[in-house]
């Protein structure tokens, strides 16, 4: 592969990089009005400085800094479920999607400063019932330390 005189080849993630990519592929989530955390049992790709808990519903960061956080929720049936990121168990309002009409796709992203030991979760709330996620990319959560 030729990158030209002025371009450099892309660098892979070095060991110890702060990143996480987790997925729930086709799960069924029983949603409570006050909130239910999404679990990510299907796929996890974690750097050395972010871990997922045993319940697979919470990431913990070990290095302070600014983090890019993105999520996606794709359901099989349109619904008015609301979605949001939780930091240390508290909703981040700028990440909340509270639809007024039924929908099947929810996507949001944010950059936030996090401290050592802060936790990140994805929550569904605002209805009482079940949500069935699409097979494949049903729900995903991505976290990358950017500075």
Image (tube, rainbow, N blue to C red):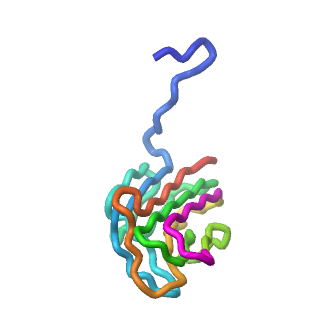
Extreme residue toward the right, this view: 94
In the picture, which quadrant includes the N terminus? top left
| Residue 29 vertical position relative to residue 140 in the rendered view, above or below | below
Count the marks: how many? 0
Name, please, the residue furthest toward the top: 5
Q: Position of residue 4 (x, y in %)?
A: 57, 13
Q: Which of 33 and 39 is in front in this view?
A: 33
Q: Is residue 23 left or right of residue 6?
A: left
Q: In this view, does 74 lie above or below 68?
A: below
Q: Residue at x 56, y 69 (%)?
A: 85
Q: Is residue 103 left or right of residue 132?
A: right
Give the magenta-colored segment's residue range. Answer: 99-111
74 lies left or right of 84 = left
Q: Is residue 56 magenta?
A: no
Q: Residue at x 46, y 87 (%)?
A: 128
Lateral position of residue 42 relative to residue 123, left or right: left
- Residue at 50% x, 14% y is 2
Of 57 and 80, which appears nearest the observer?
Answer: 80
Q: Main secondary structure of the magenta part?
A: strand
- Residue 31: x and y, percent? 44, 82
Residue 116 x, y percent position in the rendering: 55, 61
Image height of 100 relative to 136, above or below: below
Residue at 43% x, 68% y: name it.
75
Q: In which quarter of the image is residue 70?
A: bottom right
């Amino acid at each position: 592969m030729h990158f030209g005189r002025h371009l450099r080849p892309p660098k892979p993630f070095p060991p110890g990089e702060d990143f996480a990519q987790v997925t729930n592929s086709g799960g069924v989530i029983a949603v409570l009005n006050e909130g239910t955390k999404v679990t990510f049992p299907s796929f996890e790709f974690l750097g050395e400085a972010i871990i997922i808990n045993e319940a697979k519903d919470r990431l913990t960061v070990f290095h302070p800094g600014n983090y890019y956080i993105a999520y996606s929720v794709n359901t099989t049936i349109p619904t008015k479920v609301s979605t949001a990121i939780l930091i240390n168990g508290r909703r981040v309002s700028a990440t909340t999607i509270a639809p007024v009409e039924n929908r099947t796709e929810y996507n949001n992203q944010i950059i936030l400063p996090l401290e050592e030991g802060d936790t990140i979760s994805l929550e569904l709330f605002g209805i009482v019932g079940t949500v069935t996620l699409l097979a494949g990319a049903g729900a995903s959560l991505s976290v990358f330390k950017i500075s």
